[in-house]
Image (cartoon, grey):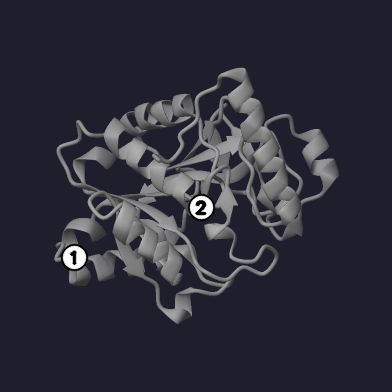
Amino acid sequence: MNVLNENLVIVVPARKNSKRLKDKNFKNFHGFPLVEWSLAAGLFLKQQLRDSKKKISVICSSDDDQILGLVKTKYSSSVLSVQRCPELSDDKANLSDVIIDCIHKLSVEHMIGLDDYLGGSFILLQPTSPIRLKTDLIKFCSQIRNLGEYLSLVSVNERYNELKDIYEVINKNEVNSDFSIGQIGERLLTWKDIERTNNTAFVDGSLYLGFISMLEEKGFMPESKTLAFPLSVDCSIDIDTEEEFESALVLIKKLHDLGIEYVEPLV
């Protein structure tokens, strides 16, 4: 399957409530609401993939009036907004369902053909991972064009602090689904397992690509068909707490001081 032979949706899911860091998706991060950094990344990816013959749409799914208002004003000509229903707005919501919900609502609210998109692909950009280097996104687009037999592409790095997020990378770049989600078969993964395995990676949530038709059946990382995309610099932080938010601010200042280019929102 060729990603660029089908329509592509770039989805930024940004719900309102969060348990550990209140209203984090609209919290000011380095001069802009946190969600805006992922919207900017989505538009950057769209620009890089502009040679595709198929339609590419950037979508923000939210139940937050502030976020939806931002999209409808500042990004009215470039990002589509989708009102998320209450059933998909809590911390137990399945992101596969959120993406499929986006597609169905797009067909109604924006007069876009449903079948065209259900047969296409998606890129998921989590707003809690705001720091994405331009060089990484350019390489990500290049990898999309050369996906080969793989059905999904996920960003990874070497930073990890929770066992559930660690995966084994085999054959240099393939995510091994038998060594994933913090377990081996029915046995929970331990730090000793990690010490015995040289090729481990943290799936960081910054970049996901896959086919919409496979979400319900296979999820984000189909067995033996998921390609790992290593980030060039260990710069991805998944923000869930105030401490992680502050760490991300320190990191982006460091990148700025070093002259490393990252994607940021337009003023």
- For disc 2, the marked residue is 33
Look at the picture and state if 4 lies above or below 122. above
* Residue at image point 62% right, 34% down: 252
Give the x, y percent position of residue 138: 39, 27
Residue found farthest to the top? 259
Give the x, y percent position of residue 267: 40, 41
Q: CA distance from mark 2 to mark 1?
A: 25 Å
44 horizontally vs 222: left or right = left
Which tag is nearer the camera, tag 2 or tag 1? 2
Q: Looking at the image, which is closer to me, 87 or 17?
A: 17
Secondary element type, mark 2: strand
Q: Looking at the image, which is closer to me, 107 or 19?
A: 19
Q: Is residue 171 visible?
A: yes
Give the x, y percent position of residue 109: 21, 70
Quarter of the image holding residue 141?
A: top left
Look at the picture and state if 33 lies above or below 88. above
* Residue at image point 64% right, 50% down: 180
**Looking at the picture, which amino acid does disc 1 mark?**
His
Q: Is residue 151 visible?
A: no
Give the x, y percent position of residue 152: 42, 44
- For disc 1, the marked residue is 110
Query: Considering the image in quadrants, where does the N terminus appear?
Result: top left
